[in-house]
Structures are given as structure tokens and as C-alpha cells.
Amino acid sequence: MSPVHWLFGDQLGPHFTATDGGATPPATRWLLIESRAVFRRRRFHRAKAHLVLSAMRHRAAELGDRARHVSAETYREGLARTVGAGPVSVHHPTSRAALALVDSLPQVTVHPARGFLTGHREFADWAARQKGRRLLQENFYEHTRRTHDILMEGDRPAGGRWNLDHDNREPPPRGADALDVERPYRPGEDEIDEEVRRDLDRWEREEGISFAGRDGPRLFPATRQEALAALDHFVTHRLPTFGAYEDAMLAGDPVMSHSLLSSSLNLGLLDPWECVSRAEEAWRAGHVPLNSAEGFVRQVCGWREYVWHLYWHFGEDYRHRNALRHTAPLPDWFAELDADAVGARCLSTVLAQVRDTGWTHHIPRLMVLGSHALQRGWDPGAVTDWFHRCFVDGYDWVMLPNVVGMSQYADGGLMTTKPYTSGGAYIHRMSDLCGGCRYRPGDRSGARACPYTVGYWAFLRRHRARLEGNPRMTRAVRGLDRLGDADQVARQHRDAGDAPP
């Protein structure tokens, strides 16, 4: 009997169907299982559900007669219907829940993870060499660059510095509604997408499965061919302007020069090595500046790899971390992506982007959505789940460290050296989102006080005892003593409750 290999819905590229030598085993049969229970457990964004199912069905069609594509209530049911008790292999899944499932099945053999540059053993060895020090992203990034010879000139980083982040913090061009850059690659839909949309409609109508967000044309690649086209388009037309405006925001241009490749990487349609290789080739050919190439490389082989390994390294208890003891539930307007209920222009704009597309880039995620949740004291577990469900590139391994550690500081500093939150001044400097807003970024109190400015000072006051000993927060915390309206700011923040700003 031909061997059967199980492909999860985020293992869809050729590197998941090839042997270690790169060849495709000629006799292998491939198994893809759609589990409706996954969509019952969480209320996913409709665009995300559509993308994942479309990608799985496109992959099954590509593999042809050698693939068995099954729609079942659970993975166990799908496995029983297709292979019974027969042997099955699978590559290491990307979530703890999925790994626990395959480990519980005696017939399943688990092979090492793919889709990442560094393996679990390599990270464990690197972490051991840190000898109890904080596992800083910048140190792991340097290790990855050296080990894989990425953007290197001999034993030194290209340009003499490992990190060019200081060159990548330009505000958007003054007066511009959008960057002067070619629009991103967008795929077209086909009959498979039409079938997926019909099935999602039926699930909502007959199966009691509900979704968040709005349904619209598929915006992200669902096939290897589409993902490669998106990568080529980005490197050729958009990477040159990526670096300088990496952290900038414009209301009329939510994508700026960002790659939009995260969903393709996280579905397994692209391998990180081909992404960083293309960026480096473009820089060495003189087509893009070094700060753009390095900024993109850092996102892929620095941050993405780092988050993947921290997810496994910190253990299952990490998801329950709540160092700041934030317990407020997510308000309905946030959970329902009700951007129209929000008066603060920055938050309303970003929430609408998520509602309509299931995506926004990393700065709105961190400094608009995450910052607001942190200031309001929302439960970090609920915030993590919301990001997981509502973003097309959101998976457990992606969002757990990014939200618990980076965004909500719920791990107390295991991952980052300070909480990432700010007043309205940061948003005003890095975007055009304060223009035309009912609030003023410099006002701490009164009818036009910016919710972020009020929230920032209230957050510092609430957690002063913890933060005043942090060298990176000392100056900010001392600023509380200069606030003549500190009590009014705190009271205004409390009175806001969970009402939309």
C-alpha cells in the first residue's frame, strides 16, 4: 500500500510534499482534511475561513488523483474515513493542540517541522548559550543571519550594522494620501472560490457556524503560483520603498509598501528562504536600498522565526500569563469589529480595515489595536484569541507571543523590555489619522481629550509600582509627577469604561 502523508491547512507548499533531498516521493498519497469543528470552536473572520479553505482545495486539485480531500466534523473522523487504522505521516504541526492530537494517534508518525529556517534543536542550543539571560530577538536575529549567511559581507553584517530600524521610522510623506508606489498584487477568484463561498453560506445557514467580518473578493494568494507572483511583484515594485515607511500609517493607504506575504508564508505556500533570498538578490543587484532589504529580512528571518520558537520554548502555561492582572472582557463593539461605533479616527479606520479585509500591518496592530486593549486593561487571553480569529495570517503560534508578550506585556517582560503603548502624539507623528478626528492628540482631559493620551497616562499611573524600576520606562513614569491633572485623567479613563472612544 502506498504511504499516506497528512497535510494540514498551513502545510500547502512544495516543501511539505518533498523529501529532504527535494524530490517528491512517487508513491505517496496526500491527505487533506477540512474540520468543521475548527470553525465551530472559534468565530473566525469570514475572509480567513475563505482563504484557508480555498488554499486547501486548490492544493488538493493540484495534487490530483494522489490526493484525498475530505470534509469532516473532526480530524479524527476524517482520518478514520480515509485510512482507518493505517499508518500516516505528518510534519510537525504549528499548534500545540494539533501536536497533541497527532501524538495521541498511534498510527501517526510525526516528522520535523518545515517552513522555517531554524529547527527546534538549533533554537534550544542557542537559548542554552544565553545562560539565563533574556532571549532577545536582536541576538537571535544576528545568530540566524550568521548561520544562514544572510545579508553578510564576510563575517560582518552588510552595511556594518545588524539592524537598520532607525532608518525605517520615517513618518508618511506630508500631504500624501498614499505612497507613490505600485499597488500590491491581488489574485483573481475562480470556481473553487465560488464553491468555498457557497459552502460558507450553507454552514452559516444550516450548520450554526458563524463568522466575523465582511465577505469580499479574496485578496490574498491561495496557490503556490499566486504566492510566487505576489513575491515577485513585491520585490520588483514595492520593496524599494518598504524600508523608510515601514512604521508609517495612512488612512487612505492601509497597505503602504508592505509585502502582504505573511498569509502565504503561514499557509506554507512560500518558504522563508526564498523570500529572504529574493530580497538579498535585489539589494546586491542595486535595485533596492539596504534598509529596505534588511527591514524585510528582519521581519521574516528575525521576528517570524523568533516568534515561532518562543511559542514552543515558553511552554503551554505562557498563554495564561497575566502579569498586569488585566481581566476586563472585550467590549461588544470591538469583538464585532463595529468600526462605525468608534469616534476616534485612528481606531475606527484600523478596525474597519480588519472588518473589511482581515488584515492591517504591524504598526496598527501594535500601536492602535493592541495599545488600546492594553490601556483599557482587557484580558490578554481574550485579546490573543481575537487577533487569532480576525486576521488572515493569524495562527496560535503567531499570535500567542506577539500578543501576550509584545502587545499586552502580559509575560512581565520575558519577551520585550517594556510595554509598547503610547499617547496620541506617536499616532499623530507617524500617520495622518489624527486629521479630522473629534479628539486632539495633545489633550489629556476634557471633551476633546485623545483616548490614547488619556489611556497612556492612566496606564502608567495604574502600573507605576511595576514600571518605575524599568530603565526604559523611568522617564515616562516620572512624567506623572508633572501632570497637574493626573486625577482628572485617571477619572476620565475610568469613566470611559468599555464604551467605544
Image (tube, rainbow, N blue to C red):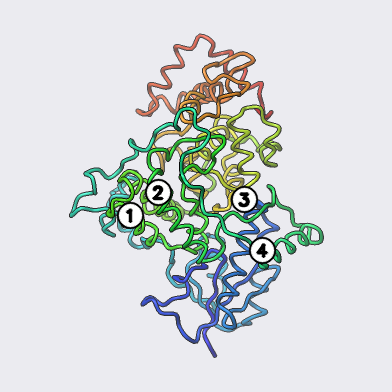
Q: Earlier in the sequence, mark 3 or mark 2?
A: 2
Instruction: Judge by depth and name the residue closer to the eye, 389 or 241.
Output: 241
Task: Please name the residue that numbered disc 1 is placed on.
Answer: 282
Mark 3 near mark 2, Cβ–Cβ under 8 Å? no
Three-letter amino acid code of the residue under disc 3: Arg
The picture places residue 70, in percent across and down from the top left corner, at: 66, 74
Q: Which residue is mark 3?
A: 389
Q: Residue at x 42, y 63 (%)?
A: 271
Secondary structure beneath disc 2? helix
Query: Neighbour class for label 1 at 10 Å: few (<14), some, many (≥20)?
Result: some
Residue type beneath disc 2? Leu
User: Which sits earlier in the primary sequence, circle 1 or circle 4?
Assistant: 4
What residue is pinned by disc 2?
Answer: 239
> Looking at this rendering, what residue extends furthest in the right direction?
206
Residue 193 badge? 4
Left or right, 260 with reference to 239: right
Report how far apart the C-alphas of labels 1 and 4 lie in the structure: 33 Å
Please tell me which residue lies in front, 41 or 25: 25
Give left or right: position of 32 versus 413.
right
Query: How far, Cα to Cα, is label 3 from label 2?
Result: 28 Å
Task: Tell me the quadrant of the picture where the N terminus can be found.
Answer: bottom right
- Dot 3 or dot 1: first in sequence order is 1
Circle nearer the viewer, 4 or 3: 4
Identify the element where label 4 is drawn: helix
Q: Are marks 2 and 1 in contact (CB under 8 Å)?
A: yes
